[in-house]
Amino acid sequence: MALVKYNNNSISAVTSAASIPSGAMTHIKTLEADGSGIALTFHHGSSGVVFDSTYPIYVFKFINIHPATDGADLVWQCNATGGSGFNETITSTFWDAYHSEGGAGASLRYLTDYDQAQGTAYQYMTNAIGNDNDKNLSGTMYFFNPSSTTFVKHFMHTINTITGDNYSENQFGAGYVNTTSAIDEIQFKINSGNFDAGKIKLYGIKDS
């Protein structure tokens, strides 16, 4: 946007610069898979990661995630501050819409094997990612108020996947981490084999 000068006032009359607007996304950290590991972990205070009360909403962007193993899934879990094991209690829902490349199959369904009811397992984000060279997934996850010590922690994620049998699957997960302890660490991994390639970007949304 151009800077416009009115009434012969000089730029020295400007007393402050514009602040980041409410709702603006601020990039915090990017982790990139190199094919050597199964997990990518964001831990507050480690390697420049911010995941606390600085932002009320955090956004994860998954870009061209490619698994080494055909039919593997992207999953996640978290730790309360000072905790370990990635085994916080989660209640969630999971459903998807799918359509084959050849147009032979299309439907909307709820997947009971991918949700949790007070479970401590890693939460599913996908259903059977293909590992052909051109196949991958991309999507977004929102995580709300991780540092709250009053409320449980809500999340929502939407992922689009190309499956091994050439279906586009738009997958939707949501729920809450059932703890009033602050969460300061979250881990994403492939549940079978390694991350072959892909990036996960973490953003904060200001003053939401």
Image (tube, rainbow, N blue to C red):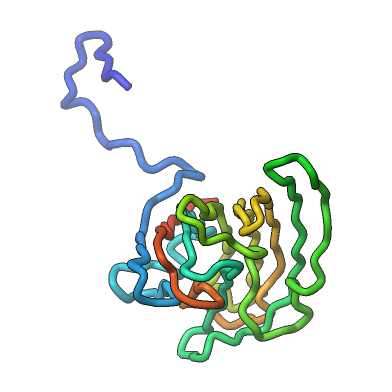
Where is 179 relative to 58, above or below?
below
Where is 21 relative to 81, above or below?
above
Residue 139's x, y, as percent?
55, 52
Is residue 7 or residue 25 the one in the foreground? Answer: 25
Left or right for 150, reference 147 = right
The residue positioned farthest toward the top in the image shown: 7
Residue 28's x, y, as percent?
36, 58
Numbered disc total: 0
Is residue 185 or residue 124 the one in the foreground? Answer: 124
- Looking at the rendering, which quadrant does residue 14 occupy? top left
Left or right for 206, reference 166 = left
- Looking at the rendering, which quadrant does residue 34 occupy? bottom left
Left or right for 35, reference 8 = right
Is residue 91 or residue 113 the one in the foreground? Answer: 113
Residue 87's x, y, as percent?
59, 87
Where is 97 relative to 118, above or below?
above
Residue 128's x, y, as percent?
64, 65
- Looking at the rendering, which quadrant does residue 52 occupy? bottom left
Is residue 182 visible in the rendered structure shown here?
yes
Left or right for 142, reference 94 = left
Is residue 206 visible in the rendered structure shown here?
no
The residue lying at 69 percent from left, 78 percent from top is 90
The residue lying at 27 percent from left, 11 percent from top is 6
Is residue 97 or residue 81 the one in the foreground? Answer: 97
The residue lying at 25 percent from left, 8 percent from top is 7
Locate the N terminus and report the quarter of the image it occupies.
Answer: top left
The residue lying at 65 percent from left, 82 percent from top is 179
